[in-house]
Amino acid sequence: MKRLRVGVIGLGMGGVHVRSFRDCPEAEVVAAADTDPNRLKEVANETDVPNRYTDAMKMLRRENLDVVSIATPNKFHKPLTLAALKAGAHVLCEKPMAMNAREARQMLDAANKARRRLMINFSYRFTPQSQALKKAVDSGILGDVYFARTIWHRRRGLPRFGGWFGQKALSGGGPLIDLGVHRLDLALWLMGYPRPTWVLAGAYNPIATALAKKARKKFDVEDLAVGLIQFDNGATMEVEASWAANIKENELMETRLLGTKAGLIQRNLNETYQFEAEVYLERDGAPWDMKLHAAPEFSGSSMAHFVDCIVRDKPHTADGEEGLIVMELLDAIYASAAQGKPVQIREGRR
């Protein structure tokens, strides 16, 4: 069988994309692009990528790619996605999908028009533990989920301080659009992506702004955001994200769901990127705690899933529709925080 020809744009986070695609026997990374020639050389040499470009558009014109993976600053997600779709490729785009919901809608419309796939790299779904939790929730163990709280806080963890992450013109926002997007998608996915109706939110930046001023760094986004989301099924979700908060932990991640039959939690251990998961329920009038000790083997990454679905012509998860829902929620959270009042989510999305 012919292997899919893959090109990766942006080799910061994209280095992970290259390595993951290389682990897929039905895909071949034939080209990579990055505006930094030193990073391009370093990653391409390490991963044996044969064709290297400092101009991504030139790569798209020359390489006849089946799949393009985009891992650039958020500002470039939309134009590069549109160009890759026009070139006839399926697209895997890093989160967040775009700078805002308007851009996300343009990307989704272009993918539908081109009859090509568009997947968003919501990578926290693609772990054995998350996959096991999804199966448990889908089995009905929680009953009807009516509340969720999903958070990612850092005590002091501003990525590449002074770089593009802290500049709204390049990133679209701060920790909410960077970290919160992962926990938001995970909770929505576990809940079956209910339809959001309105949002009440707040955003703050006292800590990072002071640090940036002292260090003479550029910073014009929030360092903490919080949103309360109402869904059309009556469920409510709280989402929180920060790069700088006066908390005990250096890194705190947690997603909690409460249902009519049981509750669920996934949280990181010892401030690391290792997680534990538990389910709390009642049986015969007694409270029980169930701990997931070892999740079943799950051979996959988001890249492996995308390749498998393309090759076997199966639907893929984390599609453009779900990416758009997340962008609409991020827009509403930022708008509510700016306006100081609830914001409704537009109807007619699906």
Image (cartoon, grey):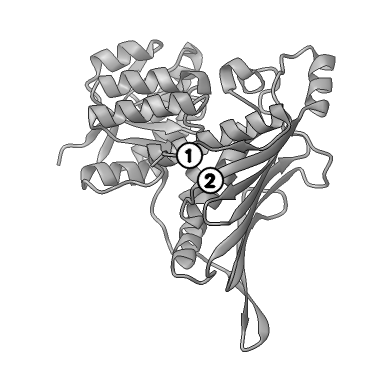
Residue in view at x 74 percent, y 14 percent? 217
Residue in view at x 78 percent, y 27 percent? 205
Quadrant position of residue 156: top right
Q: Position of residue 56 (x, y in %)?
A: 37, 14
Residue behind mark 2? 196
Q: Amino acid at mark 2?
A: Pro
| Contact check, label 1 and label 2, Cβ < 8 Å | yes
Number of dots carrying numbers: 2
Residue 221 seen in render: yes
Q: The C terminus is located in which quarter?
A: top left
Q: Position of residue 261 (x, y in %)?
A: 57, 74
Vertical position of residue 182 compared to residue 167: above or below = below
| Structural distance between the alpha carbons of marks 1 and 2 | 8 Å
Q: Residues within 10 Å of mark 2 (few under 14, many from 20)?
A: many
Residue reaching furthest to the bottom:
284
Image depth: mark 1 or mark 2 in front = 2
Vertical position of residue 121 compared to residue 273: above or below = above
Residue behind mark 1? 325
- In the image: residue 310, left or right of residue 82: left
Q: Residues within 10 Å of mark 1 (few under 14, many from 20)?
A: many
- In the image: residue 69, left or right of residue 170: left
- In the image: residue 178, left or right of residue 58: right
Quadrant position of residue 269: bottom right
Residue 50 seen in render: no
Q: Amino acid at mark 1?
A: Ile
- The local secondary structure at tag 2 comes to strand
Quadrant position of residue 117: top left
Q: Which comes before the other along the chain, label 1 or label 2?
A: 2
Give 172 or 121, whichever is nearer the viewer: 172
Give 339 or 262, whichever is nearer the viewer: 339
